[in-house]
């Protein structure tokens, strides 16, 4: 498996090229709660539809398929540098610093780095999530950043694409863990074959974006807008573990532009904005 | 016994491809009755004596939980066919899981693992769930993988055992190795030594008359009311596992199977208690509400309480449930009549059963207990008290 990853990475470099005509690109990300920066362990007030206060201790998400739009309007894939936070076309954005040592670690990552062909770019799009093949490989042998046990979602056979926690493991807490659901496996083939609800968040509504000076903002207050955070559907996990029967998920999925519980997405995602 | 297996394994290996056995470990030799197929073994985790032995130590080792209070064996006790006798399993931090511990007898033959999961089709991947799962916390190892591996490296026994089990690995003490060893140990937890097995193999003295009558009723015989196949048991609990859901080395079809047996019916959609609705919890398809894997009935006499949530205490309660064609809950948040659950299997329309038939059926079910399996030293805790 290790070797296959290296080969895949090498192929990626080969296919996407690293020639003379490429230019480096570095895309900044920020985690916010309303107007405030996300700080691990800090309390935020007036959240959701019921003005709940939450002390946030985790804020991490995977990004894949990052593309820039050139002046002709064409979309160009960003070839990611291969680092501890980036493998193939998947990157982990990590804003927690280990303030809650039950789930986090000290390292953070707030940007995606890579290369694109020489040119001028004024747009950006990506998916928040892990592509199918990578999502269902064995996490026990996966390379960083796909080897974090707190981002594994083993009972669903994939990863948590987005993890935002308040507190740790008591019923007083609130948490959002989002990943693919509706997956099916095959005992003969030995793995996951398909997922009816991949839950990869499509972020393609950011408007004009300057890769050199712009920042992609993930705003928790926008994510929980309209959600009741202080009440929990009885007998379901606190917050939302992306279960299709957990009605606490419905407004959150709506704000992510995802279908939920048989209802289509109410609109595009509003969690991410560009500035 | 172990020496014999080792000897056989070496002999086979030498006769086989002739490469250096010390480089890959001692191949496992299965000891199965002729009526039973070999289990499927993933190509990337061939069975060896060394892996099984390592897996046995890991299975019984409390250092495999974050707070070192639980091992796999805490919820999977050999004398109970690797169940725990509780309605709901309790994790290392005291959190109750929504499900009852399943038997690990013949774990290597399961088409899918746990009560209701379409994705978990390999023991190696399933092991990650109790180890690292956070909702609910079971062994509580999330974010502690470095600490876990340090505990293994610092042990006086493990470095040598890991090296013997994974001789091709430069650094054999990894999470991947742990899951492979645990899977290898579980794959050889085979249980095909019940009185019913001896009967099936041709020993006409193996079952007494009551057990024989129970067998006939189980497999479609007419009841006293004259109804053919009144009890319908074998439709979901047939095959060599006494579960329609099974897999083996020669199987080419996906035989995962989930069904609704009318245990609950909270509303017109056939809902079960929230958060514990079978494969609906993963698929979101209302038609999947209440659909769970029919568990193997091997050793069923010692694996109570029954059902995914341990809500039926005894075999009599289970027979009452099926005789009625579903359970009615009179009041409370789970009120409703499972008989009317829209997703319920069409086999479950209820039946009449006499006291004698009930005793015969229970006698047959209890004859599925494999006493050797419950007592076999090779499956037991290797750590001295």
Image: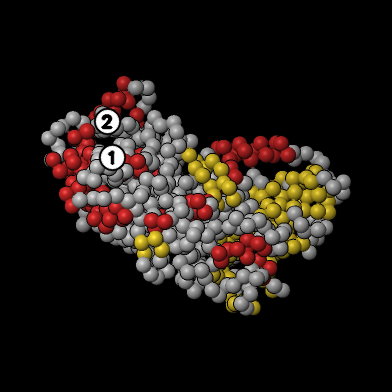
Residue B282 seen anywhere in this rendered image of the structure: no
How many badges with numbers are in the image? 2
- Residue with the mark numbered 2: B35
State the image quarter where residue A108 is shown: bottom right
- In the rendered image, residues at marks 2 and 1 fall on the same chain: yes
Q: Where in the figure is residue A244, as x and y percent of width and height?
A: 54, 57
Relative to B369, A226 lies left or right: right
SS for tag 2?
Answer: loop
Q: Which residue occupies the foreground of this view, A57 or B253?
A: B253
Relative to B229, A256 lies left or right: right
Callout 1 crowding tier (Cα within 10 Å): few <14, some 14–19, many ≥20: few
Q: Where in the figure is residue B373, as x and y percent of width and height?
A: 22, 44
- Residue with the mark numbered 1: B228
- Callout 2: residue from which chain? B
Q: How was this image coloured?
A: secondary structure
User: Residue at horizontal 34%, vertical 29%?
Assistant: B21
Q: Which residue occupies the foreground of this view, B14 or A57?
A: A57
Q: Where in the figure is residue B62, as x and y percent of width and height?
A: 32, 57
Q: Where in the figure is residue A189, as x and y percent of width and height?
A: 48, 36
Q: Which residue occupies the foreground of this view, A154 or B220?
A: B220
User: Residue at horizontal 58%, vertical 72%?
Assistant: A229
Query: In the picture shown, does residue B220 fall above or below A213?
Result: above
Instruction: Compare marks 2 and 1 and give the one earlier in the sequence.
Output: 2
**Alpha carbon separation for disc pair 2 and 1:** 27 Å
Query: In the picture shown, does residue A271 fall above or below B76?
Result: below
- Callout 1: residue from which chain? B
User: Residue at horizontal 78%, vertical 39%?
Assistant: A19
User: Residue at horizontal 18%, vertical 30%?
Assistant: B202
Locate the N terminus of chain B and report the quarter of the image it occupies.
Answer: top left
SS for tag 1?
Answer: loop
Q: Residue furthest front?
A: B226
Relative to A78, A171 lies left or right: left
């Amino acid at each position: 498996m290790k070797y296959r990853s290296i080969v895949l990475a090498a192929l990626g470099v080969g296919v996407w090229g690293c020639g003379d005509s490429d230019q480096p690109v570095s895309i900044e990300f920020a985690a916010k709660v309303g107007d405030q920066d996300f700080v691990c362990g800090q309390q935020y007030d007036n959240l959701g539809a019921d003005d709940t206060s939450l002390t946030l201790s985790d804020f991490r998400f995977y990004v894949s398929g990052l593309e820039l739009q050139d002046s002709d309007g064409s979309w160009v894939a960003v070839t990611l540098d291969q680092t501890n936070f980036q493998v193939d076309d998947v990157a982990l954005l990590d804003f927690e610093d280990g303030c809650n040592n039950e789930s986090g670690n000290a390292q953070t990552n707030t940007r995606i780095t890579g290369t694109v062909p020489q040119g001028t770019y004024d747009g950006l799009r990506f998916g928040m999530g892990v592509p199918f093949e990578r999502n269902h490989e064995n996490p026990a042998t996966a390379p960083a950043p796909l080897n974090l046990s707190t981002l594994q979602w083993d009972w669903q056979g994939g990863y948590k694409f987005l993890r935002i926690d308040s507190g740790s493991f008591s019923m007083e807490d609130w948490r959002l863990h989002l990943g693919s659901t509706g997956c099916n496996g095959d005992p003969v083939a030995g793995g996951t074959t398909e997922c009816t609800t991949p839950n990869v968040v499509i972020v393609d509504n950011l408007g004009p974006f300057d890769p050199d000076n712009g920042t992609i903002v993930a705003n928790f207050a926008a994510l929980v807008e309209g959600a009741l955070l202080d009440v929990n559907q009885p007998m379901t996990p606190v917050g939302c573990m992306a279960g299709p029967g957990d009605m606490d998920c419905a407004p959150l999925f709506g704000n992510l532009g995802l279908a939920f519980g048989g209802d289509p997405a109410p609109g595009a995602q509003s969690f991410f904005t560009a500035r | 016994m172990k020496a014999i297996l080792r000897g056989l394994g070496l002999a086979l290996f030498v006769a086989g491809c002739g490469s250096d056995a010390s480089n890959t470990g001692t191949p496992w030799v299965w000891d199965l009755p002729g009526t039973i197929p070999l289990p499927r073994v993933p190509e990337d985790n061939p069975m060896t004596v060394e892996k099984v032995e390592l897996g046995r130590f890991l299975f019984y080792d409390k250092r495999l939980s974050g707070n070192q209070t639980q091992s796999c064996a805490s919820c999977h006790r050999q004398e109970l066919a690797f169940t725990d006798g509780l309605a709901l399993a309790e994790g290392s931090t005291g959190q109750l899981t929504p499900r009852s511990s399943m038997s690990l007898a013949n774990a290597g033959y399961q088409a899918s693992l746990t009560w209701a999961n379409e994705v978990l089709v390999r023991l190696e991947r399933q092991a990650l769930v109790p180890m690292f799962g956070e909702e609910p916390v079971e062994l509580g190892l999330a974010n502690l993988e470095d600490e876990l591996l340090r505990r293994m490296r610092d042990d006086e026994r493990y470095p040598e055992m890991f090296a013997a089990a994974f001789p091709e690995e430069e650094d054999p003490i990894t999470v991947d190795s742990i899951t492979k060893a645990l899977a290898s140990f579980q794959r050889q937890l085979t249980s095909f030594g019940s009185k019913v097995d001896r009967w099936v193999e041709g020993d006409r003295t193996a079952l007494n008359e009551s057990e024989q009558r129970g067998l006939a009723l189980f497999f479609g015989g007419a009841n006293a009311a004259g109804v053919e196949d009144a009890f319908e048991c074998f439709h979901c609990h047939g095959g060599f596992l006494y579960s329609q859901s099974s897999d083996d080395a020669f199987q080419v079809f996906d035989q995962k199977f989930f069904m609704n047996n009318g245990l609950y019916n909270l509303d017109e959609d056939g809902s079960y208690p929230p958060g514990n609705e079978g494969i609906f919890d993963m698929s979101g398809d209302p038609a999947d509400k209440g659909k769970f894997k029919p568990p193997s009935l091997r050793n069923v006499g010692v694996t109570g309480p029954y059902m995914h949530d341990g809500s039926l205490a005894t075999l009599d309660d289970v027979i009452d449930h099926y005789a009625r064609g579903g359970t009615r809950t009179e009041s409370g948040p789970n009120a409703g009549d499972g008989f009317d659950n829209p997703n319920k299997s069409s086999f479950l329309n209820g039946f009449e059963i006499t006291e004698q038939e009930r005793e015969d059926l229970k006698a047959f079910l209890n004859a599925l207990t494999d006493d050797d399996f419950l007592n076999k030293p090779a499956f037991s805790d290797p750590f001295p008290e």
